Image: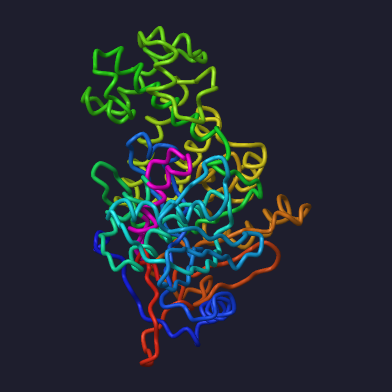
């Protein structure tokens, strides 16, 4: 069951190249062998962008790329962190005095978020010290949830090192809250799929309460993940948190216009629930109540009957204090229409009509247009990449993740895949050596051994990768007595 505790699977490190290399690096760094390993996957969101923090369901799936941490609990009050990537500097701190600097987007701060979340949940007065070596295969700032996977991994590391247990749902909720220590007002999708993902299915993730439902994708197409090679760090920019605040302000104004207790309303989904209307009716209300022109802080204060000081202290987040105008109409329109697209996407997957691939592709295209025009979270490179993907055979293409850079996800008919890869490589990547990451993900879950899939990752020419569903190089079924353990956040291996 997805809500159970994370699974602990035995592995023979000496026969697993990645684990062996990580183990050797750990010994070289700390002088002793790790006691256990923890893994958390990244994710690709198929549809449902920027609506989890508004209370609405999203539809992601885990990817093979992950965060893997080798861990040794130690008899000290120090946590020592190191990374196999030399670009990320070593870090150490007292485990009893965890300080997270929101002004510095450093890799170790995400680990500290997960660590602190578990410490505070259990009220650990004497937490176990740890030596940790991290190895990550998720491209940073790519929209594939590398930062949240690290937070989840750190939470699981801390849980195991201190001999505590939690369900996956509890872990996801704790890690969602603790990632906000870094200054990102996220909604919980990334952490939920990192823990609740299961082999062979995408997931409809719903909130309040958190739950995950299997979504079986139709056969005959693949999902292609393409990196625009433009990095966007959510915690380092106000774009993301400004959108969160715009949705919150839209919630307040819509609530007040309908006579609701607007001070208690935080999410756009709350408004719909209180009014008891459909998503389509909420879109009509948005058109009636919110004007398309940007709202100044003065106008917002006048609408709500509050002072500017109250607005800044009671509603706006720390990193949106200096924002002077907010687009409420456009943001609310995106959220309600995107929420409807998610439900329609799942419905099509459930009913599996003959033209399911075309219908799902059209929903992805509608989602992208809304992200670009209503939510304004695209960028020129993403626009170019989406256009190229559609030009060369994708039935649907959209940004995935926060946007302003990162990746696109495209739905491509299987029989067009090779031509698609060749043409997109030429049109987008060939002229720029930095545009080198292009991941192909099989969507036909139950035909693992078809010719497009291999047991291990298969490298094609240039920036292309074909991935199987399973990380079979991380786990084994037959084990010697000298095996150790790898703790998986999700059941995806």
Can you give x and y, in whole percent of width and height, for residue 202 in the image? 37, 56
Q: Specify start and end residues of the magenta stretch as a single range.
A: 178-202
- When the figure is inspected, residue 61 is found, relative to residue 313, above or below; the finding is below
Q: Is 201 inside the magenta-drawn segment? A: yes
> Can I make out residue 8 in this image?
yes
User: Residue 490 is drawn in which quadrant?
Assistant: bottom left
| Residue lying at 40% horizontally and 83% vertically, measured from the top left | 476
Residue sitting at x 55%, y 34% = 377
Viewer-proximal residue, 86 or 441? Answer: 86
Picture mark count? 0
Q: How did the renderer colour the structure?
A: rainbow
Near-viewer residue (4 or 121):
121
Residue 427 at x, y = what percent?
72, 50
Tell me which residue sits at (27%, 61%) in the image: 2
Residue 55: say if magenta. Answer: no
Q: Position of residue 29 (x, y in %)?
A: 58, 75
| Position of residue 89 in the picture relative to residue 7 (left or right) | right
Q: Is residue 109 above or below residue 53?
A: below
Which quarter of the figure has residue 188? top left
Q: Nearer the viewer, residue 128 or 313?
A: 128
State whether residue 200 appears in this view. no
Residue 168's place in the image compared with 37, above or below, is above
Residue lying at the far bottom in this picture: please name it. 480
Give the position of the N terminus as an image quadrant: bottom left
**Relative to 192, 236 lies left or right:** right
Q: Name the quarter where the C terminus is drawn.
A: bottom left
Residue 333 point in image, percent of width and height: 42, 25
């Amino acid at each position: 069951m997805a809500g159970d505790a994370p699974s602990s699977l035995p592995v023979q490190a000496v026969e697993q190249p990645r684990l062996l290399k990580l183990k050797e690096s750990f010994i070289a760094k700390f002088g002793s062998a790790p006691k256990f390993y923890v893994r958390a996957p990244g994710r690709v969101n198929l549809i449902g962008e920027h609506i989890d923090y508004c209370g609405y369901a999203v539809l992601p799936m885990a990817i093979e790329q992950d965060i893997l941490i080798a861990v040794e609990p130690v008899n000290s009050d120090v946590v020592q962190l190191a990374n196999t990537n030399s670009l990320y500097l070593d870090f150490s701190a007292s485990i009893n005095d965890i300080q997270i600097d929101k002004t510095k987007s450093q890799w170790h701060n995400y680990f500290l978020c997960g660590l602190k979340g578990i410490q505070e949940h259990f009220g650990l007065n004497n937490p176990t010290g740890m030596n940790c070596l991290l190895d990550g295969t998720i491209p940073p700032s790519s929209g594939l949830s590398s930062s949240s996977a690290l937070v989840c991994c750190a939470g699981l590391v801390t849980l195991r090192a201190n001999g505590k247990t939690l369900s996956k749902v509890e872990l996801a909720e704790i890690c969602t809250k603790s990632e906000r220590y870094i200054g990102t007002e996220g909604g919980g999708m990334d952490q939920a799929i990192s823990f609740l993902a299961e082999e062979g299915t995408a997931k409809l993730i719903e909130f309040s309460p958190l739950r995950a439902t299997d979504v079986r994708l139709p056969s005959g197409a693949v999902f292609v993940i393409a990196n625009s090679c433009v990095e966007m760090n959510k915690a380092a920019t106000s774009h993301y948190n400004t959108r969160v605040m715009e949705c919150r302000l839209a919630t307040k104004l819509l609530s007040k216009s309908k006579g609701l207790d607007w001070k208690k309303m935080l999410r756009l989904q709350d408004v719909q629930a209180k009014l008891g209307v459909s998503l389509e009716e909420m879109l009509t209300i948005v058109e009636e109540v919110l004007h398309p022109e940007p709202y100044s802080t003065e106008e917002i204060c006048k609408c709500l009957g509050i002072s500017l000081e109250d607005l800044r202290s009671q509603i706006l987040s720390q990193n949106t204090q200096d924002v002077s105008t907010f687009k409420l109409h456009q943001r609310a329109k995106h959220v309600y229409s995107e929420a409807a697209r998610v439900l329609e996407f799942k419905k099509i997957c459930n009913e599996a009509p003959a033209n399911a691939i075309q219908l799902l592709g059209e929903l992805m295209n509608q989602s992208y247009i809304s992200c670009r025009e209503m939510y304004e979270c695209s960028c020129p490179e993403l626009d170019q990449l989406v256009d190229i993907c559609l030009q060369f055979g994708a039935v649907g293409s959209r940004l995935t993740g926060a946007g302003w850079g990162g990746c696109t996800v495209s739905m491509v008919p299987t029989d067009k895949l090779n031509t698609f890869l060749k043409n997109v490589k030429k049109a987008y990547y060939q002229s720029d050596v930095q545009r080198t990451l292009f991941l192909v993900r099989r969507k036909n879950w139950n035909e693992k051994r078809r010719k497009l899939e291999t047991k291990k990752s298969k490298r094609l020419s240039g920036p292309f990768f074909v991935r199987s569903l399973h990380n079979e190089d991380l786990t084994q079924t037959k084990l010697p007595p000298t095996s150790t353990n790898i703790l998986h956040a999700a059941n995806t291996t």
